[in-house]
Amino acid sequence: MLKLRNSEPARRLRALDTEQGGAVLLLCLAAVLILMLMAWVVMDAGQVTRDKIEAQTSADAAAYSQASVKARAMNMLAFSNIAKRSIVGVHAIYESMFASYGMWVMARYAECQAQSPSCDIEVLAENLELYWKEADNDYGTYGDNADYYQADMRALDNYQRYISDMAPWWGWTEVVVRAQRNGATMASSFPVPQGTPRNGIEGLPQQIINASGRQVPFNFLSTVDRLPARPGEFWANMVDEGMYDRETWQWEHRLNTDRHRERSELGAANAAVIQRGATSLFSYGLQRTEEDIGEFGRPWRLYFNGNEAHWLRDTSNITLTYHADASYYDERRKKFTVPAQDYHYDDSMRSYRPEGYWGMARSEISFQGEGAPTMWEAAWTARMRPVALPREFEQVGFDFNALYHSSIIHLSASAKMQGAGGGSEFFDDMVYMEKVSRGMGQSTIDGVSR
């Protein structure tokens, strides 16, 4: 037994038991493992943050582009209003001028018939001849010929109606294109344009609701995207809002009367006399103009019912974007399966693990001219704004879940536009958003900036 204790193997075992060399190596290996896991976390979190920023950037760019398109459309409506006003002014001036001129000539003729001592029959005859000559020429072309003005006015009116009908779809298409150029897989805006995309995606909203696991009513919002402008009334809007007040008309009549006097070969009538008649007859000129031009002369005016929340609703759009990334919950999470997988899920839980990123933004059109917004100045521009101001959704009757339902078909249509399967391959993520949107009620949506 003594020999065994003092043998060489025994001494080596005792030495190994007391040896401390290499112990640090085990600590280093543990530290390396921890550092590696920390590095993976930092890299993964950084990648997720970057992808989320890209998703939000795509939403911001898309929203601003849509507002820019709609602001441009509003400016085109304003420019067309100004062109209409110019045509109405020229037509009404001719009507008023020739009517007042005719009244003056007839009055002077009556005086001569009464053998007034101050009457010069030869001058009257010359002015009467000039009156009929100009009536046959200038007045016949520009004053009493409705077809001369109707063609231009009809073209302007058709252009305004075209811009008004096209701008919502133009803006929505801009949302989709801008978002996809920034990496988005799907994108849409709310309110959606008039009309519903088809091609087999009509039942998608109900399928998503059914797959969410808890039945809710298929609630949706009937709000349709359109510009906040409508055709107005000829007299009230062209005269009152169009800046054709009495003083403006007097100035324009005086200017045209002076030109008429300077250019008339025989002097025509006294300018002051014609001016007094024209000023009193400017309403007659406008009425005749309305009869000649008809409904094509109606200017477009702002549609505002006095409710500030409704005005914010009608001048803004909410944009939703989605960036698909299959590695979100697959390859990236496999880094953390050390020493064993740390999570388990089955098919019933797929809708709780999104494989992409959602972004949301809101933009609006804004009037940058002096004073209250008007359709007589092309001063509309685009700007970003918070998604929801305090109590805004409540005041306009919006619900985010219904807003999402109203946008599903258009989100699917945007996926089809770039060759995807119309949203079917992102079905789980759309179900995930369905569940998230149910929790964004009136109290939780207030103050959301993006």
Image (spheres, rainbow, N blue to C red):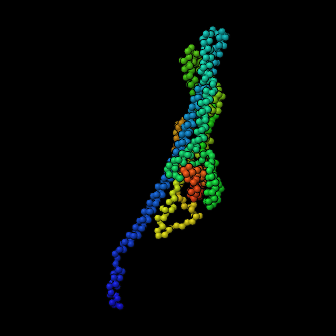
Residue that appears at 61% across and 57% down: 208
Residue that appears at 63% across and 18% down: 102
Q: Quadrant of residue 90?
A: top right
Drawn side of residue 30 relative to residue 415, left or right:
left
Q: Is residue 389 visible to the viewer in this orientation of the structure?
A: no
99 is higher (above) or lower (below) than 43: above
Drawn side of residue 62 relative to residue 203, left or right:
left
Residue 358 at what x, y percent from top left? 53, 54
Image quadrant occupied by the N terminus: bottom left
Residue that appears at 49% across and 50% down: 182
256 is higher (above) or lower (below) than 295: above
151 is higher (above) or lower (below) than 14: above
Residue that appears at 62% across and 49% down: 198
Residue 326 at what x, y percent from top left? 51, 59
291 is higher (above) or lower (below) than 348: above
Residue 389 at what x, y percent from top left? 56, 49
Residue 431 at what x, y percent from top left? 59, 58
- Total of numbered circles in the picture? 0
Q: Is residue 213 visible to the viewer in this orientation of the structure?
A: yes
Q: Residue furthest bottom?
A: 1
